Image (cartoon, helix red, strand yellow):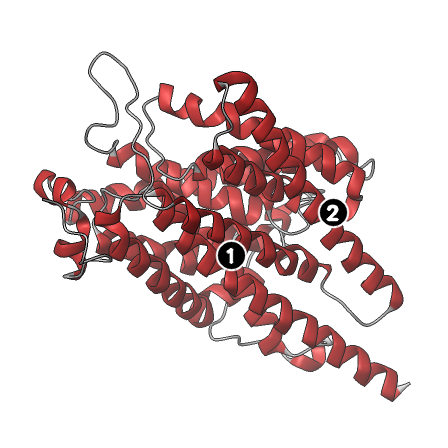
Amino acid sequence: MENFTDVKYILDGFLFVFAGILVMWMAAGFAMLESGLTRTKNTATVLTKNIVLFAISCIMFYFVGYNFMYGEGSSFIGSGAMLSGKTSEALGYPVMADFFFQVVFVATSASVVSGTIAERMKLWPFLIFTVVLSGLIYPIQGHWTWGGSELGGLITGFSDFAGSTIVHSVGGWAALAGVLILGARKGKYTKDGQVKPIPGSNLPLATLGTFILWMGWFGFNGGSQLALGSKEDIDGIASVVASTNMAACAGALMAAVLTQLIYKKVDLTMVLNGALAGLVSCTAGPDLGMNIAFIEGLIGGALVVFAVPFFDKLRIDDPVGALSVHLVAGIWGTLAVGIFNPEVALLAQVKGIVVIGAFVFISSFIVWKILDLIIGLRADEETEVNGLDIHETGLEAYPEFKRA
């Protein structure tokens, strides 16, 4: 029996470490996707944001975030710091493996914000916001859900397997609050209400980023099985991974078909975001099987095709389509669990979405507004026109290709 316990401890710990490595690789995917869908004059800043936000997220979650999320504390927020109160013996798997797996999810949420505010926000206000998001906002709402407090019973019954709401929509709500204060990029919308496309600089890079994210998602969802010590667990992981892949395929195909029907051409950027929307859509319920994942992915891919122009009509400028992918599809994926899983009440899902969304949006809006008043969020017009790179980093991503 002792040997069996040791084997389970080892396998469960290995799952967290290996899946965490896959999720960490998603940081590269976000960096490549955002770089490819924005202009070359901002590429060095985009890359700087993505690597530093990962560093900040990991540091903040270690010092306070993990305990605020999983510590005892109150129903609102956990207590303690630096993994205090958690032991490997009590968890049944290495506490450091648990921390590592959890921390890469935090960075994912922050990466969603990065893409939405790209090309016109100063570097340091964004990084300061990341400190608050990863150290306070994300862990607090995580304490209500995965932390088990249920906010004193307010969101009892809410189910989110791997984070359609808890990770992806949280990033989306935080990003929406910021972009409403920040405003659109210069020249994106004309005075008569027309939308001026601002093409991305590198579609091969954006495609590579999408494939990296797609691969990393197998760790994101598969690792959320949280155990590898039994036949039932590996069966569950295999089902989750296969369903995750199916949802991405369905989302990409739906986006391809719809853009052909609507625009008479297949829009690659929509197909990329369709695949990602499919992934987000099944993240709340990847354990429900491939057939349901297929439906979730199809609807997620369709939602992106209509959400991107919808945000443009509202003059909400999102360079990479992150709001459509992570916020809209995240809401849909969370609702889908209440629709397709008879053990989960749809009302419980709605309550969870509303409570978490309201908390994250309002708290993020306050933080963004304070930062705007103190140091300003937006780069000046000359910096935005010339590109953020020289002003923020002193570097150009492609110095050989100077504009005339």
130 left or right of 352? left
User: Vertical placement of 361 versus 239: above or below?
Assistant: above
User: Vertical placement of 85 versus 399: above or below?
Assistant: below
* Camera-nearest residue between 250 and 101: 250
250 left or right of 23? right
Question: Which class describes the residues within 10 Å of circle 1: few (<14), some (14-19), or many (20+)?
Answer: many
Q: Position of residue 362 (x, y in %)?
A: 39, 38
* Camera-nearest residue between 5 and 71: 5
Give the mark nearest the N terminus, 1 or 2.
1
Which structural element holds mark 1?
Answer: loop
Q: Nearer the viewer, mark 1 or mark 2?
A: 2
| Residue reaching furthest to the top | 192
Say which amino acid is labelled 1: Ile
Res 184 seen here: yes
User: Vertical placement of 97 versus 38: above or below?
Assistant: below
Q: Position of residue 74 (x, y in %)?
A: 55, 57
| Residue reaching furthest to the right | 1
* Residue matched to label 2: 243
* Residue matched to label 1: 77
Q: Quadrant of the N terminus?
A: bottom right
Question: Which class describes the residues within 10 Å of circle 2: few (<14), some (14-19), or many (20+)?
Answer: many
Residue at 69%, 76% in the rendered image: 13
Q: Report, in whole angstroms, how far the alpha carbon at label 1 lies from the one at label 2.
A: 33 Å
* Camera-nearest residue between 104 and 356: 104
Residue at 54%, 52% in the rendered image: 211
Q: Position of residue 78 (x, y in %)?
A: 53, 61
User: Vertical placement of 206 versus 5: above or below?
Assistant: above
Residue at 50%, 18% in the rendered image: 264
Which structural element holds mark 2?
Answer: helix
Report the label total: 2
Q: Which circle marks residue 114 in the picture?
A: none
Q: Quadrant of the C terminus?
A: top left
